[in-house]
Image (tube, rainbow, N blue to C red):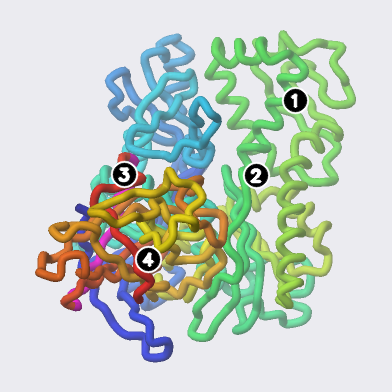
Amino acid sequence: MAEKNPQSQTDDQKSGKKTTEIPWCSPNLLVAAIDFGTTYSGYAFSSRADFDDDPLRITAHKWSSGLISEKNPTSILFDNNQKLVAFGYEAEKQFTELSNDNRHEDFYYFQRFKMQLYHHNKDAKNKQLPINSKSMLSDISGKKMLAMDVFSAAIKYMKEHLLHKLSETGDTETKKEEIRWVLTVPAIWNDTAKSFMRESAIKAGIRGDCLTIALEPEAASMYCKRLPIEMLNDNLRVQNEGFQFFSQGNQYLVLDAGGGTVDITVHEVLSGDRIKELHKASGGAWGGTYVDENFFDIIKEAVGKEKFESFKKEDLAGYNDLRKDLEVKKREINTESTKISFTIPNQLAQVIPKDYNPEILECKKGKLELKVPGIKKWFSEICDSIVSHVEELLEEQKKKQRNIESILMVGGFSESSFLQETVKTAFPNKHIIVPNQAGLAVLKGAVLFGHNPQIVDSRVAKVTYGVNTLSKIQDERDVPDKSRIRTINGVKYEKNVFSKHVTKGDDLVIGQAQEEKTYFPIYPDQKSVQFSVFSSQEENPKYVDGCKRLGSFDVKIPYTTDGTDRKVVVRFIFGGTEIKFECEDANGEITPYTFDWSENAEEECFGMAVERGES
């Protein structure tokens, strides 16, 4: 049975559709956001009083490792019993010391593991496997741990660090149950990955009813809306022409370039400080870490893959030092750079051939020098993929007669001069906005979202949603595939029929029910109905075959003498960044449900319902 979620219901007077108010932790005295990034993670918070007085009065913890930073590396170290040892800079430091003493083999060390939710394992038939509670992650040396254990440990570390920070500041009034927690996720992630993050946070000790999932580009947009104009860096015409980026009616593209993914979407500014999503989030694995991978590919070409992997295995400390140097140097590169040099570990320097193409790279006196062709190979592939996608998206918006004048660049990778210059060169007639500290826009925007989630008016459905049903057969000749026919109590049904509730591309108004449908039990004495939920990239799938099964929710139906005439009305509710459901029985009683994202949900359930076309 799915977990019930107490919500209060209201009527939308304009549309006549029923809406559901989003439940919030009450009283909500403080909002704490955790930005779980691919390369770096961090947390920030603000009290309700601070938000009311100045929304930008947000405290982000400053981590120290020689340099002060408001982000901590997404690195985590476990001992041989899979118990957390350290996180962030401290994990990097301790693992380096273990590697130098050759004592690291019994430890588990994970870096940049978030993207394994995006590139999850495939089965023997090369079919993408959904992330679930049994999914495994590989550490830097190939040892495996449960993904849920790794993610929840990282979230728990930041949660407890934040609570300790509050106690240090003398904030003894705020109780744990009075905190609204916000966890950020890329907008292009699917529902299963978002649910996995929610379950990881709950396992980390965050109450489910006090947890909100925020989409990264939306959060960044909210933060930038609050910034004064002088903190929005536009080298074109913003100040000269008095351009107001966030004025009502303005439509703009958000390019959220993080360490792993690049999320691209289109927003419109509405009245009342709200925003509307005009185009579903899209993008790809073009973040800053893939620039790193391109760099190492250049090295592998020079020394050979086997020698590079041998160096990485035998000198993990040196490999990690090179990665840290790379993280700093890649921010310095721009489209005019002619060369850049790195301190290279001695073991790697010894295997780079002295006669390797000097026009690409040279190794001398412990330094690796990358030349112009190498720099372009390093950056251009990723940056060109981003530009190409933006071009396609802008052309699509133009066909819809939308006037997208501006591009808002946020996320850590947007701080790259090379990426900024590439985008500005590709779109010379657009306002290119890069806020100061673009890498913190998501984190601080997530705090604002926690205080005021209703600021997002609507989103666009990325996929088609529906449930698996049986359909009564009027004429067997209409069912070419006879294996779909199932006879129950003398009545013939077609099985695995896709009953659609949301169409790909639909505008999903926040808190408003989508198309409702009426279902009936198959058996007269049936006590419950299990609805298996599917998504599809098609607009009108006929069957669930080939669709992605997301999970299920169970609905109890009261027993009456009506038998199979006991109707159940099902509504999909998009009350936020996650799907919820509500069902109305024959007595008019409405019960809200949250989703059971169980990987064990059956495609064909014994308690299946039949749709009769009533609504």
Q: Residues within 10 Å of mark 2 (few under 14, many from 20)?
A: many
Q: CA distance from mark 4 to mark 1?
A: 43 Å
Dot 3 amino acid type: Ala
Q: Nearer the viewer, mark 3 or mark 2?
A: 3
In three-dimensional space, the C-alpha distance between marks 2 and 1, rounded to whole angstroms, equals: 17 Å
As helix, strand or loop, the secondary structure at mark 2 comes to loop
**Dot in front, 4 or 3:** 3
**Does the magenta segment cover residue 590?**
yes
* Separation (CA) of disc 1 from disc 3: 45 Å
- Looking at the rendered image, the quarter that the C terminus falls into is bottom left
Q: Check disc 1 and report the residue beneath it.
A: 298
Q: Which one is nearer the viewer's eye here, 555 or 358?
A: 555
- Amino acid marked by disc 1: Ile
In the displayed structure, would residue 273 be above or below residue 539? below
Q: Which residue is mark 2?
A: 286
| Residue wearing tag 4 | 450
Q: Earlier in the sequence, mark 3 or mark 2?
A: 2
Whichever of callouts 1 and 3 sits on the residue coming sooner in the sequence is 1
Mark 4 and mark 1 in contact? Answer it, CB < 8 Å.
no
User: Element type at marker 4?
Assistant: helix
- The segment highlighted magenta reads 588-599
Mark 4 and mark 3 residues within 8 Å of each other at the beta carbon: no
The mark closer to the camera, 2 or 1, is 2
2 and 1 marks in contact (CB < 8 Å): no
Question: What distance separates the C-alpha of mark 4 from that of mark 3?
Answer: 32 Å
Magenta run includes residue 346: no
| Label located before the other in sequence (4 or 3) | 4
**Sequence-first tag of 2 and 1:** 2
User: Relative to residue 489, is residue 287 drawn left or right?
Assistant: right
Cβ atoms under marks 3 and 2 closer than 8 Å = no
Residue 523 place in picture, x, y as percent: 20, 57
